[in-house]
Structures are given as C-alpha cells and as structure tokens.
Image (spheres, helix red, strand yellow):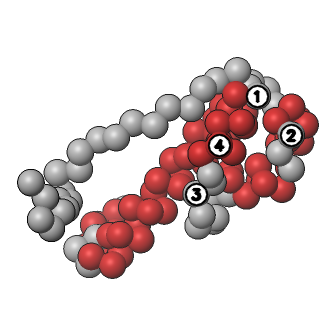
Amino acid sequence: MNRKHIGSSFFDTVDEWKKNPAFRQAYEERREKFELALQIKKLREHEGLSQRQLAKISSVPQSVIARIESMNSKTLPRLDLVSRIVASMGYSAKIVFNKDSRTRHRLAGAA
C-alpha cells in the first residue's frame, strides 16, 4: 500500500514559523547554542573521551559538560569555559563573524 503524506512537512512548517520575527529570533539563538553543543560533543567523541574523562582533564564538573552538550539548554557557555574545555583536548577555540544579509542594524547617529 502506497501512503502519501498529507499536510506540510516539518521543515515547511518551521519555514512558515520563521516569518514571525519573535520565532525567528528565538530559533537563531537556539541554533547557535545547538551548533556549539554539537561541536564540543563531536570533539569529545572524536578524542574517545567520556564526559567524565573530559571533566577530569579540563577541571570542569561533568554536570557542566553535560549541560553544555545538552540540546535542551538555553544558555550559551562563557567563552573562557569553552576555551578551557577544548584546550584540554588539544584544540583552540576560534570565533568567526559573518555578515548576515537578512538582518541589518544601523547605529543611530553613526558617521
């Protein structure tokens, strides 16, 4: 039996929601946190470390590492904390700024 999907896909629905400025802002904030969490987790797993082992070598509590890696956490960790965690695995943290053509902020009175 061939069943067809009825209705919008999840991604179509999210694209529709992104038209709402409040949703789009919340989505972008969570996306940044999600990407950071995923990168740290991938590095840890690539190095063959458990959260407990990473906690020991970085002197960061395992609960903090778990919170950083959690996809449900809403807060971004401090940069010095991220640097300390990745440095303990032999990496350095680098921040890159990209111009977002979708959003343009102007400073009042800027010359």
In the image, residue 56 sits, relative to residue 35, either above or below, namely: above
Q: Nearer the viewer, residue 93 or 48?
A: 93
Badge 3 or badge 1: first in the primary sequence: 3
The location of residue 19, given as percent across then percent down, is 22, 74
Badge 1 or badge 2: first in the primary sequence: 2
Amino acid type, mark 3: Leu
Q: Indicate the quadrant containing the C terminus: top left, top right, bottom left or bottom right.
A: bottom left
The location of residue 79, given as percent across then percent down, is 59, 45
SS of the residue under disc 3: loop
Residue located 15% across and 67% down the image: 108
Q: Which residue is mark 4?
A: 80
| Crowding at mark 3 (Cα within 10 Å: few <14, some 14-19, many 20+) | some
For the question of whether residue 5 can be seen, the reply is: no
Judged left or right of residue 63, residue 91 is: left
The location of residue 24, given as percent across then percent down, is 32, 70
Badge 4 or badge 2: first in the primary sequence: 2
Q: Are marks 1 and 2 in contact (CB under 8 Å)?
A: yes
In the image, residue 24 sits, relative to residue 43, either above or below, namely: below
The location of residue 99, given as percent across then percent down, is 23, 45
Amino acid type, mark 4: Asp
Q: CA distance from mark 4 to mark 1?
A: 12 Å
Q: Are marks 4 and 2 in contact (CB under 8 Å)?
A: no
Q: Are marks 3 and 2 in contact (CB under 8 Å)?
A: no
Judged left or right of residue 81, residue 10 is: left
Q: Which residue is mark 3?
A: 76
Q: Quadrant of residue 90?
A: top right
Q: CA distance from mark 4 to mark 3?
A: 12 Å
Q: CA distance from mark 1 to mark 2?
A: 9 Å
Q: CA distance from mark 3 to mark 1?
A: 19 Å
Q: Indicate the quadrant containing the N terminus: top left, top right, bottom left or bottom right.
A: bottom left
Q: Residue furthest top?
A: 90
Q: Which residue is mark 2?
A: 59
